[in-house]
Image (cartoon, grey):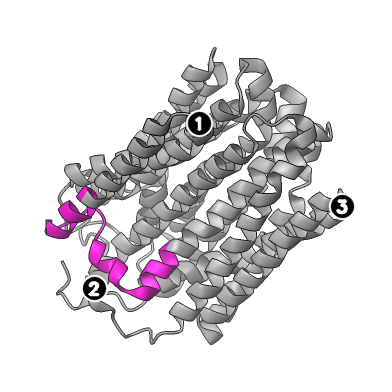
Amino acid sequence: MTISQQVSPASPALSTRRRWTVLAVCATAMFLIGLDTTIVNVALPDIGRDLRTDTRGLQWTVDAYTIVFAGLLITSGSLADRYGRRRVFRTGLVTFGAASLACALAPSLEVLIAARALQGVGASMLSPVALAIVVNAMPEPRERARAIGVWASVFGLSMATGPVLGGALTTALGWRAVFWAGVPIVLAALLLVALVVPESRGHRHRRLDLPGQVLLMTSIGLGVGLLIEMPRLHHATAGLIAGPLLLAVLVLAFVQIETRRQQPLMDPALFRRPAFAGAVLGAAAVFVALNTILFLNTLYLQETLGWSAARAGAATLPLAVGATICAPIAGTLMGRRGPRLPLLLAGGFLAVGGLGLLLAGDRGGTGWALLALALVGIGIGFANAPLTTTAVTGLPKERAGVAGGTTSAARQVGAAIGIAVGGSLVADVDAAGLAAASRPGWIIVSGCGLVLVAVAALSAQSPGRPGRGDEQPPR
């Protein structure tokens, strides 16, 4: 079944104005959830002081959102195909808006973390469903391609500008304003959804994979939790052994169950394709690097140098500008030369940017740090489009949706790991020692760049040449 065939024949064709209004509504929702992935980082020091929590509490504040978001992405897409995309999209908006209110009013860290997890539930209903709504509303391939380009650009821009906006809101109105800001956007989106977004469903419904869903969520949560709590467990030998052992058992059980299911949540056979496995690893690596930088940089600038949240957020502007400018260039290069060149550029710039941050930390130079952030932003801008393309290249259309969902989930897992690793490096470190404690983080960022260089080599395989995982007929 092609994408264009997903439009219900019973649905009347939408006018051009209404189609692009549908895109605007979906893009607004995507901007909101992309923003929420990074906007909180720059407010973390203020949250820590107000709610009297340490670095681990701040890590859970960010990762409660990304863990749930990543774990529910694929299932939410399946629910939308079965029960109606507009219905699930509206449910996601309501859930996200209510959770934002709960975050803004949270009297304690525990309530804030629970509300952030609920935000993740809402976000998982928006991210995959928004793209499906846009595809359904625009059956003409050329118009649909332009629309998807706009949609992707808005999401990327929201990720990059989150720290800037978060810093300005935190300085002017306090950290709770970071969560209040999303509420009017949700209300406006709900009104527009009711007025202009048509209902649609998938022609083929995937069965819900509840065992796979539970094992995936548990595995991601335990893995990230171990990274966050490892500094606290270093004296407890039993915990250090039992935690990783339990994680290994869960992962093996997940692979075994998914291999035997007819319609698995995440098809393990896809990972037999080197290009697909590399693209998923690369997507995670990009977000590991981005979130490690945002977490460590925020703490250093505010806690060590005494910068305001607004100034610390503005310091990420070179990263945002680099990512925004280079994303469309990557698309052009990919169309002409394939994914290998933009991935090589992404990996090179990211690796050099990480080394630049290491040099800036040693010399204490703000100019070096801003240049390094610009290089990292250029790397991120070149990375996202070719990674998604590499993930789905050579796959039957029936499996492209699962491949895209898996790559999106990998990005959120990478974000959670980046926060967990960054926090573990500086846990229990005083303000004066943050620069030295952050050095391994900049090395990790450079290592993520080298991962992208390796992915570029894998993407050089013939696009039409399936891996071993494609020897089986499509499910």
- Checking the image for residue 60, the label placed there is 1
Amino acid type at mark 1: Trp
Q: Earlier in the sequence, mark 2 or mark 1?
A: 1
Q: In 3D space, how far apart are the residues under numbered discs 2 and 3 (Cα atoms)?
A: 49 Å
Q: Can the viewer see residue 452? A: yes
Q: Position of residue 379 (x, y in %)?
A: 64, 65
- Checking the image for residue 363, the label placed there is 3
Amino acid type at mark 3: Arg
Q: Where is residue 419 in the image (x, y as percent from the top left)?
A: 56, 42
Q: Which quarter shows the C terminus?
A: bottom left
In the rendered image of this protein, does residue 3 appear above or below residue 265?
below
The residue carrying pointer 3 sits among few (fewer than 14), some (14 to 19) or many (20 or more) residues within 10 Å by Cα, namely few
Element on which disc 1 rests:
helix
Q: Which of marks 2 and 3 is nearer the N terminus?
A: 3
State the image quarter where residue 43 is shown: top right
Question: What residue sits right under mark 2 in the picture?
Answer: 469
Element on which disc 2 rests:
helix
Q: Answer with left or right where residue 162 lies relative to residue 365.
A: left
In the rendered image of this protein, does residue 107 appear above or below residue 124?
above
The residue carrying pointer 1 sits among few (fewer than 14), some (14 to 19) or many (20 or more) residues within 10 Å by Cα, namely many
For the magenta stretch, what is the residue range? 253-280
Q: Is residue 204 magenta?
A: no
Amino acid type at mark 2: Gly
**Is residue 111 or residue 101 the one in the foreground?**
111
State the image quarter where residue 183 is shown: top right
